[in-house]
């Protein structure tokens, strides 16, 4: 059984652990280098990207995580995790670093502030099915390399559609929170399942 880690420094750690477990992985929190070395894949949850960046460096995890990703470890980032996986940022603070896993430019808080959080229906491009998505102070992909596969798009407040789920090699990123489901609804775990497929 594959072991999927969830970066447990900030964000929806418990919800991602539950999702990884539902798709058949052994799910563990990751706060230390030894824990990072022991996992087959990693999820970077939502939260505050500037704080995640600072905590990764404070825990001496930034470079080891970047090295593992670039060596091929499957990784998934949601919301702030998408920002962490980008090569370039729009709206970042001075000195903010990202892991450079996906050749894309991501705009922080593109969909607005906390009060602009919303739920919407997306088309999951790989099979044309509908996906319910929750956006919370969400980023979007401003631009990306042609090699990046766009998995879903959404209309932004600027009137244009922007990628909100992408995949490039061993890395997956979503603007929305795939770990969250409506109260009483069945969890849609296809993003977590896609991560587990990359391990296999």
Image (cartoon, rainbow, N blue to C red):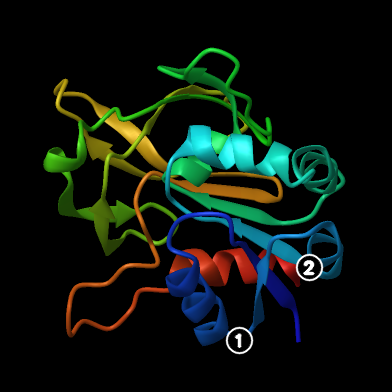
User: Which residue is at a point 68% across and 34% down the rendered structure image?
Assistant: 99
Q: Which of the marked residues, 2 or 1, is nearer the chain's N terminus?
A: 1
Residue 39 in view: yes
Q: Which residue is mark 2?
A: 40
- The C terminus lies in quadrant: bottom right
Residue 94: x and y in percent read 53, 12
Q: Say above or below: 41 vs 166.
A: below
Residue 12: x and y in percent read 43, 63
Q: Give the side of residue 92 with respect to residue 132, left or right.
A: right
Check disc 1 and report its element: helix, strand or loop: loop
Check disc 2 and report its element: helix, strand or loop: loop
Q: Say above or below: 110 vs 92.
A: below
Q: Residues within 10 Å of mark 2 (few under 14, many from 20)?
A: many
Q: Which residue is mark 1?
A: 24
Q: Give the side of residue 25 with respect to residue 163, left or right.
A: right
Give residue 3's quadrant in the image.
bottom right
User: Which residue is at a point 55% across and 26% down the rendered structure image?
Assistant: 104
Residue 150 in view: no
Residue 89: x and y in percent read 50, 20
Q: Residues within 10 Å of mark 1 (few under 14, many from 20)?
A: some
Residue 123: x and y in percent read 28, 54
């Amino acid at each position: 059984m594959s072991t999927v880690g969830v970066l447990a420094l900030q964000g929806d750690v418990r919800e991602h652990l539950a999702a990884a477990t539902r798709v058949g992985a052994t799910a563990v929190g990751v706060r230390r280098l030894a824990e990072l070395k022991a996992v087959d894949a990693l999820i970077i949850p939502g939260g505050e990207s500037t704080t995640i960046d600072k905590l990764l460096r404070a825990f001496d995890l930034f470079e080891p995580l970047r090295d593992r990703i670039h060596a091929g470890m499957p990784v998934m980032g949601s919301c702030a995790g998408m920002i962490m996986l980008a090569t370039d940022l729009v709206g970042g603070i001075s000195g903010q670093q990202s892991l450079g896993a996906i050749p894309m430019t991501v705009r922080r808080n593109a969909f607005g502030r906390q009060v602009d959080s919303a739920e919407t229906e997306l088309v999951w491009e790989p099979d044309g099915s509908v996906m319910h998505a929750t956006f919370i102070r969400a980023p979007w992909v401003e631009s990306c390399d042609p090699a990046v596969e766009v998995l879903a798009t959404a209309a932004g407040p600027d009137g244009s559609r922007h990628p909100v789920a992408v995949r490039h090699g061993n890395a997956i990123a979503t603007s929305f929170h795939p770990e969250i489901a409506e109260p009483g609804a069945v969890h849609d775990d296809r993003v977590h399942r896609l991560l587990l497929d990359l391990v296999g």
